[in-house]
Image (tube, rainbow, N blue to C red):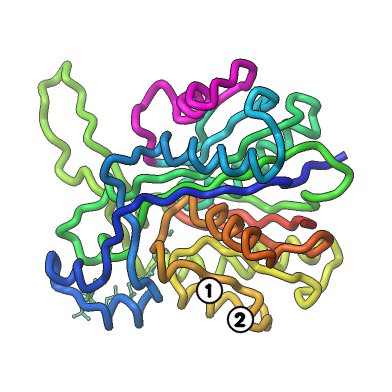
Amino acid sequence: MTSRIIGTGHCVPDTVITNDALSKVVDTSDEWIRSRTGIGCRRVVKEETTSYMAYMAAKKALISANIEAEDIDFIIVATSTPDTIFPNTATCVQKLLNNKKAVCFDLNAACSGFVYALNVAHSHIVAGLAKKVLVIGSESMSKVIDWKDRGTCVLFGDGAGATVVVEDNSGFLHTVVGSDGSKGDAIICDGHSSNSFYGHKEKEHPFTQMNGQDVFTFAVKKVPEIITQVLQEKNINAEDIHWYILHQANERIINSVAKRLKVPMEKFPMNLEHYGNTSAASIPILLDEMNQKGMLKKGQKIIISGFGAGLTWGATLLTW
Ligand code: UT7
């Protein structure tokens, strides 16, 4: 017994911010952003919220899976940008779906969140704790970005992607996940919260701060390493994988991973040009776009891999 993704959906906010529009706010240019990252524009929430986008993506995933919302028994939302600290995003999705029986919680593993959440869903199914699961990645990164910091504000975007995961005989094959808390300073957002017991002092740096080069170096080394480990442990060759669906952070990272694995770039689909880095949402958004275009065919072998703050990482081998 294993688990399988049988439905996908996504939702992105209506507002589009182009690189040219950003260059009017900070000292940057379309040329710099495109050549260093591959990003052309990003979506940014206005009226939308993390839970609303998660709900919309989930609704579409349920339709694609042909499953009723009331039959879902577990909802897990990977997010670092919930609307509220509590209730969690998953219970907000449950309420909007009018579902009564699901166990609901959020998981924060930053940009690795979707890979971690899929792993948790799979483990619940295999342990007999759940049968029909919504695994969602949803982020409003624009709320935790300093729009005056050109080093970070050009990179991120908002959106949500969802999958329906059920028990099956084939699907989820193997995974490698990990974390290194000692490198947590490489990308950090310490939030707005302060302890009112000691007075209402604002945090000095409430927004995301990142050492871009450290994260870049980590990603181009760690991602090929864990993908190779997953393949070796299942005795599968890199060329037998149809698609490598990586977290959409930077085109240069994806290029470098492909080169290190000696796999042609055609097997590394990308949509970061349109959305930027949507953190935990990037993999399920891309999965849904590929699914809608008919690119995912039954029996294909797929690797998904995420990496990000924590530091955290994960790679999972699936059969579609
Ligand atoms: O999901 C995981 C989260 N994060 C990531 O994946 C990020 C990984 N890192 C990266 O993608 C890259 O490191 C960045 C895209 C963030 C930066 O690219 P880089 O090639 O490492 O640039 P850099 O930080 O070395 O900066 C080069 C120059 C600097 O100017 P000087 O010191 O050479 O004069 C920066 O001040 O580019 C400057 N710069 C910019 N210029 C125009 C930094 N940001 C910008 C900008 N526009 N937006």
309 to the left or right of 35: right
Looking at the image, residue 215 lies above or below residue 261: above
Labels 2 & 1 near each other (Cβ < 8 A)? yes
- Residue at the spot 24% in from the left edge and 47% down from the top edge: 207
Q: Nearer the viewer, residue 91 or 174?
A: 91
Tell me the kind of residue under disc 2: Met
Q: Is residue 59 magenta?
A: no
Crowdedness near tag 2: few (<14), some (14–19) or many (≥20) residues, C-alpha within 10 Å:
some
Return the disc, 2 or 1, that comes first in the chain's sequence: 1
Locate residue 35: give its quadrant. Answer: bottom left
Identify the residue at image location x=67%, y=33%: 133
- Amino acid at circle 1: Ile
- x and y percentages locating residue 318 in the rendered image: 75, 56
For the question of whether residue 252 can be seen, the reply is: yes
Residue 102 rendering spot, x and y as whole percentages? 63, 22
Q: Which residue is mark 2?
A: 265
- Assign a secondary structure to mark 2: helix
Q: Which numbered marker is on residue 254? A: 1
Q: Is residue 73 above or below residue 116?
A: above
The reply, left or right, for residue 17 in relation to residue 35 is left
Q: Quadrant of ligand 1?
A: bottom left
Mark 2: C-beta under 8 Å from nearest atom of ligand 1: no
Query: Residue 91 lies in magenta, yes or no?
Result: yes
Q: Which mark is residue 136?
A: none
Looking at the image, is 240 positioned above or below residue 8? below
Q: Which residues are magenta?
A: 81-104
Residue 8 in percent (x, y) is at: 63, 48
Q: CA distance from mark 2 to mark 1?
A: 8 Å
Report the quarter where the N terminus lies: top right
Q: Quadrant of the C terminus?
A: bottom right
Report crowding for label 1: few under 14, some 14 to 19, many 20 or more residues within 10 A (C-alpha).
many
